[in-house]
Amino acid sequence: MDISSRTALQYKVKLCKHQGAEVRALGKNREAAMPTTVQAEQYSAPRKKEGFMSFRFVLSVTLVACLAGCANVQPVLAPTVAADPASGYVAGLFTKMKIQGYAFVVRPVGGSGEYVMPLGEDSALPKELSGQTVAIKLPPGTYTVAQWITYATLTKEISSRNAITGALRDRSFEIKPGTVTHLGSFDIWETKEATPRGLLTRMRIQPLPFSQAEVRKAFAATYPNLASQPLRCVLCTDTITVPPVAQ
């Protein structure tokens, strides 16, 4: 079974059986549970129909507001990228519905600045992803995932900023030259529901139960020129200690 088929199977099992805070790893003799990373809810007021002039006004306001509230999304590495011995890499494996953009905000511990890592390919229009590996390049240092954000794929306007509340909270990792830090495999989904308060959007980023060997295989398939770089996974079934699933 290839990595995309495996991800799709785990996605279906998760939706059917594991809507709670834990997911049991699949496969023989695998009992590790992956904790929920983050989830959030957001209300938006219903929008009335607008004519062309109103649309131009709204678009202009959006573009002006975006000057102060747009995501500076880091470009993901091309599959043919050559290894840079002076830099390190952060990677992830993502399955995502055809929805708005999602990203982790990576910040240096005790330093300033931030790097916005898209959770999958940063396309101009929403795209469905199934087991896609992406990576960005970072200077050496110690980092943490400080926030997660959602944003409009076309304009990059940030629609929500959310705290890390689960498995990645306060979990720092070191980026060394010529190495890869893999955050793990994640499933990103959201649902929308009409309510008296407006449109309710529920958003969730869920770790999937992949081993370090599995994410390494997926990374090597996407980035063959970086396949020889040492890789360490942050949230894999064999690199994170979590309480066992209750029998």
Image (cartoon, rainbow, N blue to C red):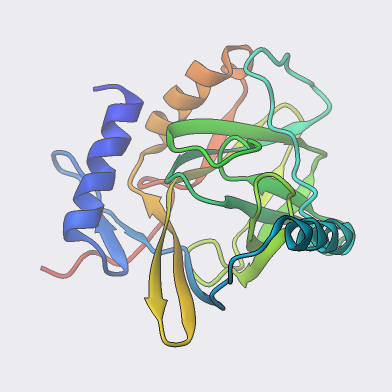
Along the line of sight, the residue nearer the viewer: 60 or 8: 60
Q: In the picture provided, is 111 more to the left or to the right than 184? A: right
Q: In which quarter of the image is residue 151?
A: bottom right
The image position of residue 41, as x and y in percent, is 49, 75
Q: Quadrant of the C terminus?
A: bottom left
Which quarter of the figure has residue 214? top left
Residue 205 left/right relative to 24: right
Above or below 159: residue 71: above
- x, y percent for residue 48: 58, 71
The extreme left residue here reads 247
Q: How many numbered circles are shown?
A: 0
Residue 10 falls left or right of residue 107: left
**Picture residue at 27% right of the left edge, 58% below the top:** 23
As drawn, 38 above or below 184: below
Q: Nearer the viewer, residue 72 or 47?
A: 47
User: What residue is rendered at 67% in x and 30% in y?
Assistant: 179
Task: State the residue lying farthest toward the bottom.
Answer: 196
60 w.r.t. 78: above or below: below
Q: Position of residue 25 (x, y in %)?
A: 24, 48
Where is residue 212? Give x, y as percent. Answer: 42, 36
